[in-house]
């Protein structure tokens, strides 16, 4: 009896489902000839409906003036952009001051650099500059040395130049020409590696620098996630002076200099 009941129920269900499927199918097939237009209309309407919805949102534009303006340094010359696509202007001049040992920076950045090094020392890190101001002629020499390395590996002249440029900025494109950039690592790192490697990011002195550089007007110039924009591979040792206002904005918002310059140009 139960089996019969179940079978009867199942049959009834199948009939119902088939009937509704058929009727849906019928309706669907009835719609089909029209669907070309009928379906398109709501799709066209939807964005149209959204547009008016968007307008009130974009009418929140008047709120924008409430946003705090992006901070800029008083002397905007510290924002000079030198990268693979922007050569240092031929008439660019620097007024050099010694920061540490034989290393010099433009006077706009030198004192801040000395203060940064002193603050790091107070925090327990002995910092050593390994590069600061560099002439175009010096860059040409360093670049050619790197090209030669690749030529010795058997690279063609063209490939050697391309590969070398990934390590040493070709003359005229190095930010070190500005006198506003320095390569800075801790002596414990330098004594161990004697070279600039990405491993430096694992040192506590790097973490301290990353956290505090902006207080002295410096930014980590070539972040890991901005290589496509800067055109330079990640350099956890290269710091660039842009003034405290810009540096704090750049570091807090995780920007690179190119992005910041685009924002303030808007
Ligand atoms: Zn550098």
Image (tube, grey):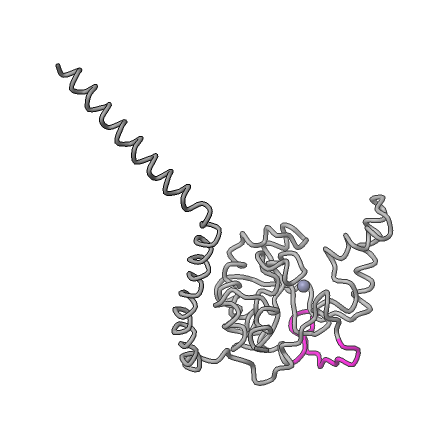
Q: Is residue 228 above or below residue 63?
A: above
Image quarter in which the C terminus is found: bottom right
Q: Camera-side residue: 224 or 29? A: 29
Q: Is residue 198 above or below residue 124?
A: above
Q: What residue lies at 57% left-to-right and 57% top-to-bottom?
A: 225
Q: Residue 211, percent across and down?
A: 49, 64
Task: Check if residue 171 falls in the magenta segment.
Answer: no
Residue situated furthest left in the rendering: 1
Q: Residue 196, percent across and down?
A: 66, 55
Give the quarter of the image for residue 49. bottom left
Q: What residue lies at 53% left-to-right and 61% top-to-bottom?
A: 125
Instruction: Tell me which segment is drawn in magenta.
Output: 89-107
**180 left or right of 24 in image:** right
Give the quarter of the image for residue 233. bottom right
Q: Is residue 217 above or below residue 21?
A: below
Q: Residue 120, percent across and down?
A: 52, 66
**50 left or right of 263 in image:** left
Q: Camera-side residue: 28 or 210? A: 28
Q: Is residue 80 above or below residue 85?
A: below
Q: What residue lies at 42% left-to-right and 73% top-to-bottom?
A: 55
Q: Residue 188, percent across and down?
A: 58, 55
**97 left or right of 186 in image:** right
Q: Camera-side residue: 58 or 46? A: 46
Task: Check if residue 91 falls in the magenta segment.
Answer: yes
Quadrant location of ligand 1?
A: bottom right
Residue situated furthest right in the rendering: 157
Image quarter in which the N terminus is found: top left
**144 left or right of 41 in image:** right
Number of on-image labels: 0
């Amino acid at each position: 009896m139960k089996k019969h009941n179940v079978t009867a129920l199942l049959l009834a269900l199948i009939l119902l489902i088939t009937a509704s499927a058929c009727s849906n199918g019928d309706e669907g097939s009835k719609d089909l000839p029209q669907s070309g237009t009928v379906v398109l209309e709501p799709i066209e309407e939807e964005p149209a409906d959204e547009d008016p919805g968007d307008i009130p949102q974009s009418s929140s534009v008047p709120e924008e003036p409430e946003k705090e303006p992006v901070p800029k340094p008083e002397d905007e010359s510290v924002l000079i952009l030198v990268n693979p696509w922007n050569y240092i202007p031929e008439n660019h001049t620097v007024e050099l001051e010694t920061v540490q040992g034989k290393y010099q920076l433009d006077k706009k950045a030198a004192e801040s650099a000395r203060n940064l090094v002193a603050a790091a020392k107070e925090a327990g890190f002995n910092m050593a500059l390994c590069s600061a101001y560099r002439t175009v002629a010096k860059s040409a020499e360093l670049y050619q040395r790197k090209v030669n390395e690749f030529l010795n590996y058997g690279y063609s002249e063209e490939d050697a130049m391309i590969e070398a440029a990934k390590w040493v900025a070709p003359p005229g494109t190095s930010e070190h020409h500005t006198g506003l950039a320095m390569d800075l690592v801790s002596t414990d790192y330098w004594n161990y590696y004697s070279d600039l490697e990405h491993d430096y990011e694992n040192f506590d002195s790097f973490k301290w620098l990353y956290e505090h550089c902006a207080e002295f007007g410096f930014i980590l110039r070539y972040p890991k996630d901005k290589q496509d924009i800067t055109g330079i591979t990640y350099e956890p040792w290269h710091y660039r002076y842009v003034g405290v206002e810009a540096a704090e904005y750049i570091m807090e918002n995780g920007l690179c200099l190119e992005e910041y310059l685009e924002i303030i140009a808007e």
